[in-house]
Amino acid sequence: KAGVTQTPRYLIKTRGQQVTLSCSPISGHRSVSWYQQTPGQGLQFLFEYFSETQRNKGNFPGRFSGRQFSNSRSEMNVSTLELGDSALYLCASSLEGGAGQPQHFGDGTRLSIL
Amino acid sequence: GQNIDQPTEMTATEGAIVQINCTYQTSGFNGLFWYQQHAGEAPTFLSYNVLDGLEEKGRFSSFLSRSKGYSYLLLKELQMKDSASYLCALDTGGSYIPTFGRGTSLIVHP
């Protein structure tokens, strides 16, 4: 069974640009979550999608958005990039995002802002 | 909201036992997860505790005490490959999205 796949693995952008990251969940998983990981803040929850609907949202500005497609694949978009957006962006999937269901993480996209 | 606290870094010797603590403050939760994350890799699921007590899984065990607001991960017979970051996460009832601690970086030396 293939794991969670994130593309691209590495990305370099400059301030003011926008970026789109992609995540393919494990087959059969319908809940997809996005996290930002930095050395100082740890894993910060961005948002969660289930059945093409954003079901939960963390405390990030509106520059961070996402969507989920009918096949459960998800994309995350960050507009007007800032230096502080440099981080590892992790996607995780679970069956339905219910209690007790462990999240399966992808290897992440390392985003660097110059 | 939830507040989760873990030591930032720990060191231990190969073959030894280490206990990584996680304390939390929350109004309610379903259970507590532990994840392992090697440098440059994805976090991977280790354990999930719902009830108080110790759950053993090979060299790794996880303990939960709801009344004391704490959990720990116990690693026995440490190996060099156990050098990684260990994340505890609360499985909260409302959103079903776990809230993660900042992680404990464990360094195992010979």
Image (cartoon, coloured by chain):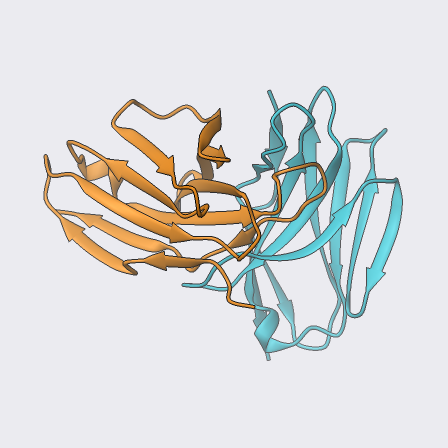
Chain colours: A orange, B cyan
The answer to whether one can see residue B100 in this image is yes
Q: Name which residue lies at 32% across and 40% down.
A: A76
Left-right relation of B79 to B74:
left
Q: Name which residue lies at 89% across and 46% down.
A: B53
Q: Position of residue A13 (x, y in %)?
A: 13, 48
Q: Position of residue A10 (x, y in %)?
A: 25, 59
**Furthest residue in direction bottom, as rendered:** B110
Q: Position of residue A107 (x, y in %)?
A: 42, 60
**A56 w.r.t. A70: above or below:** above
Quarter holding the N terminus of chain A is bottom right
The answer to whether one can see residue B109 in this image is no
Q: Position of residue B31 (x, y in %)?
A: 75, 38
**B84 w.r.t. A91: above or below:** below
Quarter of the image where one finds residue B28: top right
Left-right relation of B93 to A93:
right
Left-right relation of A61 to B80:
left
**A38 w.r.t. A26: above or below:** above
In the foreground, A51 or A15: A51
Quarter of the image where one finds residue A68: top left
Q: Count numbered badges in the picture.
A: 0
**Furthest residue in direction front, as rendered:** A70
In the foreground, B3 or A71: A71
Q: Name which residue lies at 54% across and 44% down.
A: A30
